[in-house]
Image (cartoon, rainbow, N blue to C red):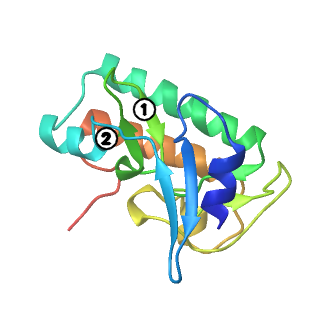
Amino acid sequence: MNEKEILTDVDHPFIMKMHYSFSTKNYLNLVLDFWPGGELFFHIVKQKRFRESVARFYIAEIILAIEHLHKENILYRDLKPENVLIDYDGHIKLTDFGLSAINFTNDSTDDIFWGSPEYMSPEMILKLKYNRMIDFYAIGALLYEMIGGIPPFYAK
């Protein structure tokens, strides 16, 4: 329901657009844009590493999307290459707001353990109080992966 509320209220060129929603007995169904470029994850795996100019382009759009969410008092909490989709023209859309926090202001903190470990801030991994900066930590981890080919603290 958080995801539906966020997608209903947020309007930004780099955030997924919901066109319609409906419920069945067991499911909430969301009708979203189709993004034929697929997930950023697919492109990282395929290309191994992005040129700096390509990584800079994607990160700039991701930063604009995250900043907009923060202005709307939404903490994203799950930035990873699988949640960044690409359109025909190579622009991104953030998707999957299932772990996002609504009404998360500048002064808000939380200590809930959410997301993918490769992109989590040390505060979240240690189950300490965290704030909006965890989204920017995830941006740094994602940028590192785009340029280096693997997440910053990846190990078998």
Query: Residue extending furthest bottom?
Result: 25
Tell me the amino acid under the disc marked 1. Ile
Q: Earlier in the sequence, mark 2 or mark 1?
A: 2
Residue 58 percent across, percent down from the top left = 41, 28
Quadrant of res 128: bottom right
Quadrant of res 2: bottom right
Residue 94 percent across, percent down from the top left = 49, 43
Asked if 130 appears above or below 145 in the picture, the reply is below
Name the mark on residue 92: 1
Tell me the amino acid under the disc marked 2. Leu
Q: Are marks 2 and 1 in contact (CB under 8 Å)?
A: yes
> Relative to 58, is 121 on the left or the right?
right
Quadrant in the picture for the C terminus? bottom left
Residue 133 percent across, percent down from the top left = 66, 48
> Relative to 61, is 154 on the left or the right?
left
Q: Nearer the viewer, residue 122 or 11?
A: 11
How far, Cα to Cα, is label 2 from label 1? 8 Å
Asked if 97 appears above or below 28 in the picture, the reply is above
Please indicate, yes or no, whether residue 98 appears anywhere in the rendered image: no
Element at badge 2? helix
Query: Residue extending furthest right?
Result: 107
